[in-house]
Amino acid sequence: MKRFGTPLKPSAIKLLLLGSGELGKEVAIEAMRLGVEVIACDRYENAPAMQVAHRSHTFNMLDGANIRRVVEEEQPDFIVPEIEAIATPTLVELEKEGWTVIPTARAVRLTMDRQGIRQLAAEELRLPTSPYRFAGSLEELEAGAKAVGFPCFIKPTMSSSGHGQSMVKKPADLKKAWEFAIETGRGKTGKVIVEGKINFDYEITLLTVRHAGGISFCAPVGHIQIDGDYRESWQPQPMTKTALKYAQAIAKKVVDELCGKTGRGIFGVELFVKGDMVYFSELSPRPHDTGMVTMVSQTMSEMELHVRAILGLPIPCLRRLPARRAQAGGRGRQAEIPCRPGASVAILANIKTDSPAYTGVEQALKAPGTWIRLFGKPMSPGHRRMGVALAIGKTVAEARKKAMAAAKKVKVVEG
């Protein structure tokens, strides 16, 4: 029988978050509900998860020496990366020494860099993807863009939330895209990926949970991204049975490869869908920003699923919600986690401030079936996601309409 302890006591189970943004904050809350002691780390003070954790440390996540220092000081049971830009060689070393990295150090290392995960998916696992090339110079980028065709997308090999990403329609714009990617990407690899455009019908995030009982899938999450940054998501995204089958097969193949025999946790598998065809795009070995909709659309959010998987707890098929029927699943089998129609819309700050405040929250919450989540980020550099509006409805269309209306009512102002 698994034994749980008490925070701040010798019996405590300790979870160390590397990265403490809005998703990490929800992971921390879910872990603390089960009596887990949470230590939050990030590159800046008072990050969202730090505001709810038992303790925190502030340092650059790319500083491997500091990661090792904190791990040896805190002695965590689980090391849980929450961002891409992390000193993964240190995580690999720590795992070899016996520390538990979620989902695995290899998964974090490969998915940190778009080059690693794309080569694994396309070249080793032979999954369908968009055409792509990698470039370490403007000359290589020009050759790569010519090979994949225009329009094409230029992305830093290590980044997130659209940082450094741009679409290029003609060769003359490549130099500007190269400079933008190299200067503004969150990690400094000196490389970019250039991807050819797929004329897809829609894109989804398939939240895939690897846990003690096998693999479970959440219903597909549809989403809209602008410049690579999430703006709106909804669940479930309608798909043909064939497309859903392909999507789950792709997700399972890549997650199983990354997890090996022992890895566990939730993965945000991003896919393009054209009719019945499904193409692999990217993968995050952690809760996904588009998956915040699960805080209202599922009885277990993606963050609770992540924590349960980390702790080796059961993830049973729950009672059926109105929208979808769960498939029976047991040990070693696949199961689909039920949901009801829900939507999430980002609340953006378009001002530069070190003291953000918010108006319109009371107006946003007047409609039944709506929620506001303010992340508590301590500043905005001029454009930043600061919260989300969430809604449920009888249909996805109704939920999207309600969430969008609520988000429009909330304004970020100078505090």
Image (cartoon, rainbow, N blue to C red):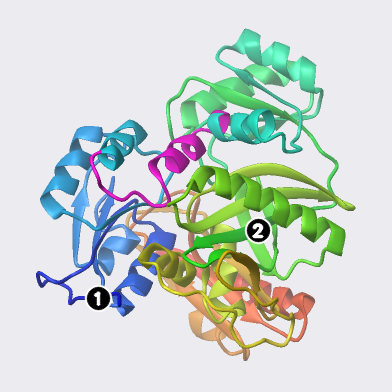
Q: Is residue 396 magenta?
A: no
User: Which of the two discs, 2 and 1, labels the residue nearer the N terminus?
Assistant: 1
Gap between marks 2 and 1, in whole Å?
32 Å
Q: Residue drawn 66% across and 72% down?
A: 343
State which mark lies toward you, 2 or 1. Answer: 1
Residue at which label 1 appears:
3
Q: Residue drawn 39% across and 57% down?
A: 21
- Which residues are the magenta region? 97-115
Number of marks in the rendered image: 2
Residue type at numbered disc 1: Arg
Q: Nearer the viewer, residue 380 or 157?
A: 157
Residue at which label 2 appears:
206
Dot 2: element: strand
Query: Mark 2–mark 1 contact, CB under 8 Å?
Result: no
293 relative position to 88: left or right = right
Q: Position of residue 47 (x, y in %)?
A: 31, 57
